[in-house]
Amino acid sequence: MTASDYQRLAGLFPTEVVTHSYVSDIALPGGAGTFALITLDNDVDHTRPTTLGPNTLLELGEVLDSLKARADAGEIVGVGVTGKPHYLVAGADLSATQKLASYEDGLAMARLGHEVYGKLHTLGVPSFAFINGVALGGGLEIALQSQYRTVSTGAGALALPEAFIGLVPGWGGVYILPRLIGPENAVKVMIENPLSNNRTLSGPAAFKLGIADALFEPADFVEQSLAWAARVITGEETVSRPNAADPSATPEAWDAAVAHGRAVVEARTSNAAPAPAKVLDLLEAGKNWTAEQSRDAECEALAELMQTPQFHSTVYAFLDLVQKRGKRPAGAPDKKLARPVSKVGVVGAGLMASQLALLFARQLKVPVVMTDIDQARVDKGVGYVHAEVDKLLAKGRISPDAANRTKALVSGSVSKEAFSDADFVIEAVFEELSVKKQVFAEVEAVVSPECILATNTSSLSVTEMAADLQHPERVVGFHFFNPVAVMPLLEIVRAPKTDDAVLATAFVLAKALKKTAVLVKDDAAFVVNRILGRMFGEITAVFDEGTDAATADNALRPMGLPMSPFTLLALVGLPVGQHVQESLHAAFGERFWLSENSQKIIDAGIKSLWQKDEDGKPYIPAETLAMLAFGNTPSTSEEVLRRTQDALADEIGRMLDEGVVAGPEDIDLCMILGAGWPMHLGGITPYLDRVGASERVNGKKFHAEKEPAQAAS
């Protein structure tokens, strides 16, 4: 590419918030010489992360050229790159990638990144990256392209998330990382973490893997890094990289890592998204490539993937939904109405209640008291919280002081009088309306008039729960998903009498708990469980009609769901799934199939329809099949898929007509964050639009005026 090509590319981004490259000359300790430190800063506070665009890269390239000239003149002995507070660089600006409308534009962007980053190891003096904060995608690749790296113990969110967003680590990461930390670890970072809810690494975890050569505390991170760099430059410090790997020496390790990665992709996406497989293709072929050969292949892969429907769908799902709508929930009252919460009560001490207690204590840092019907249950719940804190401490995810403080915040009691000074009490008891009504009556009798009463119900009427209370306006649905620590969605349910102050407090709490909240109407099973219930109903119905289990369970694989319906039901728990289905059947009738076969399995104490043979292959035991009754109208996979698509389009159309949520975007957000709906499908409603189900069933698309994922149509 020529300079004019890059300038034309930069012209496509006239509104780019440029991350500038500011250079400071620093005299290294011990007389090691003058060190040029580049600080990447967009001149905006921490609310606007530093990102990478063509203008940013061109400026960085010019700065590196000038530093090479100074290095050649003997003026500097090393070059370092760090970032503004909390960030190295948060990666490429995804919203801007939609302007790269052609393969040629995508290729130019990919090549520009490689050309600029390549300058970091041709300066003629050692190059360093001081990872002071967030380093994602191209941000982490800046560090990888440097010759040496330090990382702060306070740095959060280090990752190569490209497989998650529909791309590949295309600026050298896919080539450098496996050689730096070994192919098995590289697959964890490039495949397993992105496909596990886009998991990231902490600074200490990155150091442990070998991504960084040294680890320092945040307070004097840059000073310690400079002192370390001085020792490296003078030869006093020898850098050891025990996880580094040479593919020519250990080709079998490369092959094993790739095979493991492909198994993960198959399990998590059913190979329905192209990006993860492309990452592994580059890793596999790169075993025998030079850096230059890998560079060319990476650029071509990036350019191709940027034009795919899956990438454009992911941009919609990730940016428009998770990042934008998720942070500005539709229908949320003014946060100024929210009440302070200085103590939380949790009714129940079972697994779900214990998870909630841990979350509130860790994130809010306020006292949390749990109650249950006897001391043994209370002790077990508090013990669970303490054990989970000990696990976090053992993994290095919290400090000893934080562990002690969190444990001290959680207590238990057999008396609800312990809630007398609580500001927020949430129940997590058995999913039975009469039980929950009794609990709320008992709690209301001891708490202040301002105390908010929340329910974690997954399917029952919040309105009915509050009907007999003196202050029904204080009740709100606060529905978490299991496991609580992992699942990001929180369905906030407004009953007809719930007041704005209560609702505002619920949304402020959700943010403090680091959850994404969606406002939903008080209808049976709300959003996620209602949609999943309709899907489960169709799959169990075709099974009962005579479709063999493998066909029924695998028919939805083209959707790329994280697990098959029968597998998910077993994970949720067959009795729990059946209980929700009963609630939905009672509320909405025959369109929610209530399987007698499922009840027979539950009554027999069977945990899952599928069992595993000695080779790990699923099968249904003969004794299980013998107790079931089937019809004689089996369906093909294609018929099951189409039938399920149409059922989902029907149910979502009804939900929108009923005003369960503000719009189809909220349905999409709930399914992505609460059910693991694949990002590459761009949300469930654009998917149903693309496959024609919306028009087949409702006579119109969910996004008829402006499809949010129109590039994927």
Image (cartoon, rainbow, N blue to C red):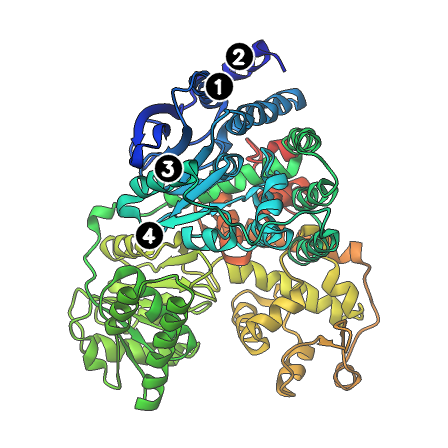
Residue at disc 1, secondary structure? helix
> What residue is disc 3 on?
230
Tell me if mark 1 has few (under 14), some (14-19) or many (20+) residues whose alpha carbon lies within 10 angstroms of its own.
many
Residue that badge 1 annotates: 58
The disc, 3 or 4, on the residue closer to the chain's N-terminal end is 3
| Left or right, 199 with reference to 495 | right
Q: CA distance from mark 2 to mark 1?
A: 9 Å
Q: Nearer the viewer, mark 1 or mark 3?
A: 3
Q: Left or right: where does residue 507 sit relative to residue 129?
A: left
Foreground mark, 3 or 4?
3
Query: Residue at position x 74%, y 53% from top?
Result: 255
Can residue 565 be spotted in the picture? yes
User: Percent x, y for residue 32?
Assistant: 35, 32
Q: Residue at x 51, y 54 (%)?
A: 209
| Residue where numbered disc 4 is placed | 511
Towards the viewer: 394 or 408: 394
At label 2, which amino acid type do we have? Gln
Please state, as top left, top right, bottom left or bottom right, where the N terminus lies in the image.
top right
Give the spatial CA distance, label 2 vs label 4. 41 Å
Residues at marks 2 and 4 touching, judged by CB atoms closer than 8 Å: no
Asked whether 689 or 323 is in front, the reply is 323
Q: Quadrant of residue 70?
A: top left
Location of residue 212 with respect to 502 vertically, above or below? above
How busy is the neighbourhood of tag 3: few (under 14 within 10 Å), some, or many (20 plus)?
Answer: many
| Residue found 31% across the figure and 50% down from its top | 217
